[in-house]
Image (tube, rainbow, N blue to C red):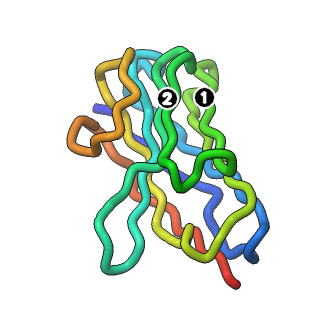
Amino acid sequence: QVQLVESGGGLVQAGGSLRLSCVASGGTFSRYAMGWFRQAPGKERDFVASINWSGGHIRYADSVKGRFTVSRDNAKNTVYLQMSSLKPEDTAVYYCAADRRSYSATTYDLNYDYWGQGTQVTVSS
């Protein structure tokens, strides 16, 4: 059983930056692909970014391409989401997730096996 804990959320002005972290425990981190998703109030959960076990395969949602960067440090059991040029529409609860198919960087939330509790990101205009 893998436990995921996100941190780094907060309140930021439009145009600002935040870095989210997600620390994994209870499993071999390098055996998992990782994803970031977000959910705004009243909306469905959306894919943001994903990264396979080695970092060699990365995907982004079109809405965040060029602004967000996903990375991982397998030695620290941590995946990051660097968010820049933030917009009010980026406001959401951000979740990290782990996929036992380590080679994958799927965009489909149903393919992920473990989820964190989420961290709130609020971007003011």
> In the image, is residue 29 above or below residue 6?
above
Q: Position of residue 13 (x, y in %)?
A: 75, 77
Q: Secondary structure at mark 2?
A: strand
Q: Are marks 2 and 1 in contact (CB under 8 Å)?
A: yes
Q: Secondary structure at mark 1?
A: strand
Quarter holding the C terminus is: bottom right
Specify whether 102 is left or right of 77: left
Q: Which dot, 2 or 1, sits closer to the camera?
A: 2
Query: Residue beneath label 1, please?
Result: 72
Specify whether 73 is left or right of 18: left
Quarter holding the N terminus is: top left
Front one among 115 and 66: 66
Q: Amino acid at mark 1?
A: Arg
Within 10 Å of the Cα at label 2, are there few (<14), some (14-19), or many (20+) other Cα atoms? many
> In the image, is residue 19 above or below residue 107?
below
Q: Amino acid at mark 2?
A: Ile
Q: Position of residue 40 (x, y in %)?
A: 41, 72
In terms of image quadrants, where is residue 109?
top left
> In the image, is residue 53 above or below residue 108?
above
Specify whether 13 is left or right of 121: right
In terms of image quadrants, where is residue 32?
top left
Query: Residue beneath label 2, please?
Result: 51
Residue that protrudes farthest toward the left in the picture: 110
- What residue do we see at 48% from left, 47% from top? 61
- What residue do we see at 46% from left, 66% from top? 93
Q: CA distance from mark 2 to mark 1?
A: 8 Å
> In the image, is residue 6 above or below residue 93?
above
Q: Position of residue 5 (x, y in %)?
A: 48, 48
- What residue do we see at 36% from left, 22% from top? 104
